[in-house]
């Protein structure tokens, strides 16, 4: 009777079942890539280029003002 029982814990182990482990690592890698892309896009958006407004001499403007 004890010979009829089988131990199925090896099927659920990630070290012995390469099909489930490869599927797991595939989904983890997709999640990691998406998290990195989203984080980088957010960081680029938050530190975006702010156009400076420099002072221009009145004599070099489009309509110059002379003294």
Image (spheres, rainbow, N blue to C red):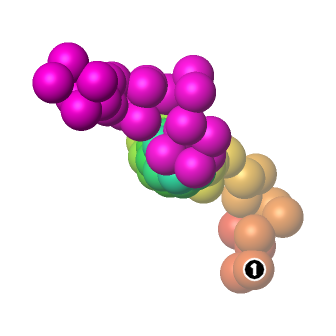
Nearest the eye: 57 or 16 = 16
Looking at the image, is 20 positioned above or below residue 59?
above
On the rendered image, what quadrant is the C terminus found in? bottom right
Q: How many marks?
A: 1
Q: What residue occupies the far bottom of the structure in this picture? A: 63
Which one is nearer the viewer's eye here, 5 or 47? 5
Note whether 20 is above or below 51 in the view shown: above
Query: Does the magenta segment cover residue 12?
Result: yes
**Of 17 and 54, which appears nearest the observer?**
17
Pick out the residue farthest to the left.
1
The secondary structure type at the circle numbered 1 is loop
Q: Give the residue pinned by disc 1.
A: 62
Which quadrant holds the N terminus?
A: top left
Residue 7, quarter of the rendered image: top left
Q: Label 1 neighbourhood size at 10 Å, few (<14), some (14-19), many (20+)?
A: few
Q: Is residue 27 magenta?
A: no
In x, y percent, where is residue 36? 55, 41
Residue closer to the observer: 9 or 15: 9
Residue ranking furthest to the front: 1
Is any atom of residue 67 visible in this view?
A: no
| The magenta segment | 1-22
Measuring from the top left, give residue 25's x and y in whole percent: 56, 40
Q: Position of residue 23 (x, y in %)?
A: 53, 51
| Residue 51 visible from this viewpoint | yes
Residue at 49% x, 28% y: name it.
14
Q: Residue at x 58, y 49 (%)?
A: 19
Q: Residue at x 20, y 18 (%)?
A: 2
In percent of width and height, residue 52 lies at 62, 48
């Amino acid at each position: 009777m004890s010979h009829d029982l089988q131990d199925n814990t090896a099927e659920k182990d990630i070290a012995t079942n390469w099909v489930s482990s490869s599927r797991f690592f595939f989904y983890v890698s997709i999640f990691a890539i998406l998290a990195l892309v989203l984080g980088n896009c957010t960081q680029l958006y938050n530190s975006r280029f702010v156009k400076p407004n420099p002072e221009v001499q009145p004599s070099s403007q489009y309509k110059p003002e002379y003294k």
